[in-house]
Image (spheres, grey):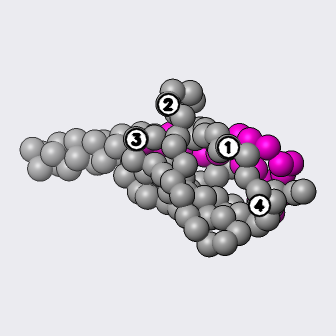
């Protein structure tokens, strides 16, 4: 009888644990970007805004801009704002093809990165 009660208790405990909601762990990916992928932007200062599908650790995230001549420069990330958004501003850029490289640390502990090519028009 005692063994049967232990088995019943164990079954109830496992069944309850299986029914509890478990948060999904997903890597942070860009869901909306300014500039957008392959977009042509007007000459002048560039506002960067990357929105992710999950919270990110801004202190451990990076933005880097590759110019048409291949030189790379780090882009400082603005402080504050929404926990799922990276924002920055770049001074006026000469016309040409650029690549914005992003790297973020999501709250799930995973690093994700990607590139957003865009063009600055005449």
Q: Which residue is drawn at 55% across and 64% down?
A: 72
In the drawing, what numbered circle is on residue 91? 1
Find residue 40 and report its image quarter.
Answer: bottom right
Q: Residue 6: x and y, percent?
A: 15, 45
Q: Residue 47: x and y, percent?
A: 71, 40
Mark nearer the N terminus (3 vs 4): 3
Whole-Å distance between the Cαs marked 4 and 2? 24 Å
Q: What element carries label 4?
A: strand
Instruction: Report the mark closest to the observer, 3 or 1.
Output: 1
In the drawing, what numbered circle is on residue 118? 4
In the drawing, what numbered circle is on residue 80? none
Please identify the residue farthest to the left as the structure is shown: 2
Q: Which residue is drawn at 73% across and 52% down?
A: 93
Which quadrant holds the C terminus?
A: bottom right
Q: Name the residue under label 3.
A: 59
Q: Name the residue under label 2.
A: 79
Mark nearer the N terminus (4 vs 1): 1
Mark nearer the N terminus (2 vs 1): 2
Q: Can residue 26 be seen in this view?
A: no
Number of residues whose C-alpha sits closer than 10 Å to that of mark 2, classed few (under 14), some (14–19) or many (20 or more): few
Whole-Å distance between the Cαs marked 2 and 1? 18 Å
Q: Which residue is drawn at 62% across and 72% down?
A: 70
Depth order, front residue of 103/45: 45
Mark nearer the N terminus (3 vs 1): 3
Left or right position of 95 against 98? right
Q: Residue at x 43, y 58 (%)?
A: 111
Find residue 81 and report its image quarter.
Answer: top right
Examine the rendered structure and indicate whether residue 114 appears above or below residue 93: below
Whole-Å distance between the Cαs marked 3 and 4? 25 Å
């Amino acid at each position: 009888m005692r063994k049967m009660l232990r088995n019943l208790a164990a079954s109830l405990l496992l069944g309850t644990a299986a029914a509890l909601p478990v948060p999904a762990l997903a890597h942070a990916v860009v869901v909306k970007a300014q500039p957008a992928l392959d977009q042509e932007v007007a000459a002048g200062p560039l506002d960067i805004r990357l929105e992710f599908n999950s919270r990110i650790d801004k202190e451990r995230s990076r933005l880097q801009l590759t110019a048409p001549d291949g030189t790379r420069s780090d882009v400082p990330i603005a402080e504050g704002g929404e926990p799922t958004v990276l924002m920055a501003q770049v001074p006026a850029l000469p016309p040409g093809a650029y690549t914005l490289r992003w790297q973020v640390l999501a709250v799930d502990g995973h690093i994700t990165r990607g590139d957003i090519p865009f063009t600055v028009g005449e």
